[in-house]
């Protein structure tokens, strides 16, 4: 069925396969990682057609916006808002002049962004008057309070500038998670927020800035950690060099190394798994020619 194109996001943590036709009998072309935005038009027998192939709709979640809000790395911002009126969603206006970086301090296995989203809706979080705007882990960004509202995250009082003038971001430090990737995802979120709100890099601050708390602890206790994080926040995600890329992809297609030229010609959003698969395919091609 052909219809108006709609945006979806990849739901499973393990990602999803894109196939050459609408069914598992068709060859796998490549895979899309968790959280990737996908625009679907035609659907057939529970499969949706994107620009590069077919994806099983069971593994996609609809995105409410016509165009999903996402970072420059393609990570869609998920929303799990604290219900209005809860005591840890104070309301009131946030001036959005600063971005405050925290770490969750929760090292338990599985304490990822989704787990913290659930916590913020719990009685414990309400009793503690605890909230922040975003949680970021190694595969997701989840928003809990709209940017334009206050949140209780800076520890500088109800009307302190940390709570009333800054957007709070918590980076997960859960066991089994990839903290380096979580930092990269957080930096991508910072770049988006800076662009949306006109926030200068000098106004990206640590929790420590507002009340002296030793947070973000891991970053603060890593040599050069804060400077390295700010460097990520200040520059756009590196993109592959585009010059000559389409012609190079065509060469690989003719050689049988690449079977999804549109995906590779985009020059961005390549998953690590697909790059590894390409390297293996190129190595096999070279071995065959020897």
Image: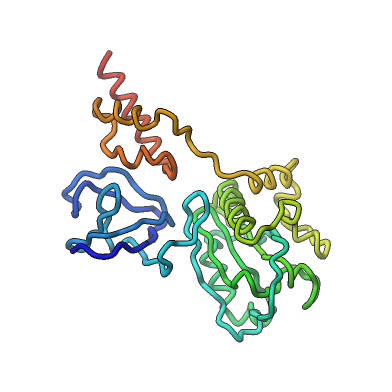
Q: Quadrant of the N terminus?
A: bottom left
Q: Residue at x 55, y 67 (%)?
A: 143
Q: Quadrant of residue 65?
A: bottom left
**Residue 123 appears left or right of 246:** right
Q: Quadrant of the C terminus?
A: top left
When the figure is inspected, residue 141 is found, relative to residue 118, above or below; the finding is: above
Q: Residue at x 80, y 59 (%)?
A: 209
Camera-nearest residue between 3 and 223:
3
Image spot of residue 184 (x, y percent):
58, 48
Q: How many marks?
A: 0
Q: Residue at x 29, y 53 (%)?
A: 50
Image spot of residue 39 (x, y percent):
34, 57
Image spot of residue 49 (x, y percent):
25, 55
The residue furthest bottom is: 85
Q: Residue at x 69, y 72 (%)?
A: 94
**Residue 157 appears left or right of 59:** right
When the figure is inspected, residue 102 is found, relative to residue 121, above or below; the finding is: above
**Residue 222 appears left or right of 120:** right
Image spot of residue 223 (x, y percent):
75, 41
Camera-nearest residue between 203 and 208:
203
Q: Quadrant of residue 168?
A: bottom right
């Amino acid at each position: 069925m052909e219809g108006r194109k709609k945006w979806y996001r990849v739901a499973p943590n393990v990602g999803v396969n894109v196939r050459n036709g609408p069914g598992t009998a068709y060859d796998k072309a490549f895979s899309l990682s968790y959280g990737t935005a996908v625009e679907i038009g035609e659907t057939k027998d529970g499969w949706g057609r994107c620009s590069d192939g077919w994806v099983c709709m069971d593994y996609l979640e609809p995105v409410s916006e016509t165009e999903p809000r996402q970072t420059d790395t393609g990570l869609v911002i998920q929303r799990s808002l604290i219900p209005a009126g809860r005591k840890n969603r104070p309301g009131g206006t946030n001036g959005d002049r600063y971005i405050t970086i925290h770490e969750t301090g929760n090292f338990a296995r599985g304490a990822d962004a989704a787990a913290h989203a659930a916590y913020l809706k719990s009685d414990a979080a309400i009793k503690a008057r605890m909230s922040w705007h975003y949680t970021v882990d190694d595969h997701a960004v989840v928003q809990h309070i709209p940017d334009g509202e206050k949140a209780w995250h800076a520890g500088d009082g109800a009307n302190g500038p940390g709570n009333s003038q800054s957007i709070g971001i918590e980076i997960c430090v859960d066991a089994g998670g990839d903290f380096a990737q979580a930092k990269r995802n957080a930096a991508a979120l910072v770049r988006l927020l800076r662009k949306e709100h006109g926030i200068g890099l000098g106004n990206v601050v640590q929790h420590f800035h507002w009340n002296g708390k030793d947070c973000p602890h891991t970053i603060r206790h890593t040599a050069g950690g804060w400077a390295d994080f700010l460097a990520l926040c200040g520059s756009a995600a590196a993109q592959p060099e585009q010059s000559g890329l389409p012609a190079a992809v065509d060469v690989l297609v003719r050689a049988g190394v690449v079977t999804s030229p549109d995906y590779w010609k985009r020059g961005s959003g390549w998953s690590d798994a697909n790059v590894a698969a390409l390297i293996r395919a190129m190595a096999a091609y070279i071995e065959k020619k020897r």
